[in-house]
Image: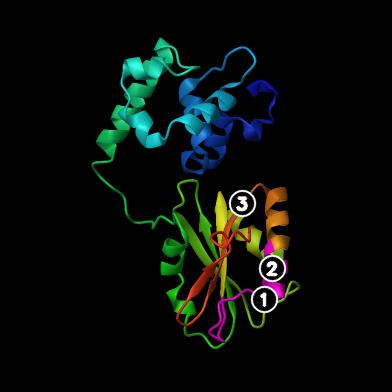
Amino acid sequence: MKIKDLPKVERPREKLVAKGAENLKDSELLAILLRTGRAGKNVIEIASQILAKHSKKRLLQMNYQDLLKISGIDSAKAVTLLAAFELSKRVLEVNDTSSPTISNAKDAVAQLTDLRDLKKEHFVVLYLNARNQLVRKETVSIGTLNANLVHPREVFEPAIKHSAANIIVAHNHPSGDSKPSEDDLKITKRLIEAGKIMGIEIADHIIVAKNSHLSFKEEYLI
């Protein structure tokens, strides 16, 4: 499928204008720099293939000749990438740490320590942008959790409002046992299904107990 055949909201350039660069995927940002695809593959497919073979860190270390060896990158594209990479390196000398980055369950738990000592179950959502930076934290419900109490509408409405790229859901177990209940599993499944429809990924579900925590992602439950 050609880029022009995609809905406007899914085209990288139009998406950047509408939602901001921070809410584009890595492949979409790279596609904008590459500009065009080649016969049989659109530019997003080429960008995705490049990122699947080469890490972002490795790309930043490449020179002109290295880039030319990558299928889908010609001289003009290589020059554009090198200019963008160099500018990024210079900008990164000033590091904005105002928004914490959530790269794994440990990072998420660091934002959820207030749940450990609560006497009632609190269902909390961490809303992240495409850089995995925390843009919003909200308590969705308080009380014994069940599939009816935690409604996808309350979970995803702030995600849309704040242009979140993905979210991490979490709740505490006052009992001290971080093992997921049957209702926990049902809630997670329901939210994942709703997220697929909304185009917003549930990156993890974390259960926080007094002296432990459990990550659904680390336990391969999602």
Badge 1 marks a residue whose secondary structure is loop
Identity of the residue drawn at 25% across and 44% down: 94
Label 1 neighbourhood size at 10 Å, few (<14), some (14-19), many (20+)? few
Q: In terms of image quadrants, where is residue 221?
A: bottom right
Q: CA distance from mark 2 to mark 1?
A: 6 Å
In the picture as drawn, the residue positioned furthest to the front comes out as 219
Q: Kindly report which numbered mark, 2 or 3, lies closer to the viewer in this rendering.
A: 2
According to the picture, the residue beneath numbered tag 2 turns out to be 185
Q: CA distance from mark 3 to mark 1?
A: 22 Å
Lower position in the chain sequence, tag 2 or tag 3: 2
- Give x and y (percent) for residue 11: 61, 30
> What segment is highlighted magenta in the picture?
172-188
Q: Nearer the viewer, residue 200 or 61?
A: 61
Q: CA distance from mark 2 to mark 3?
A: 16 Å
Q: Nearer the viewer, residue 11 or 50?
A: 50
Marks 2 and 1 close (CB-CB < 8 Å): yes
Residue 181 lies within the magenta run: yes
Q: Nearer the viewer, residue 133 or 106?
A: 106
The amino acid on which the numbered mark 1 sits, given as a three-letter code, is: Ser
According to the picture, the residue beneath numbered tag 1 turns out to be 181
- Give x and y (percent) for residue 114: 45, 78
Marks 3 and 1 close (CB-CB < 8 Å): no
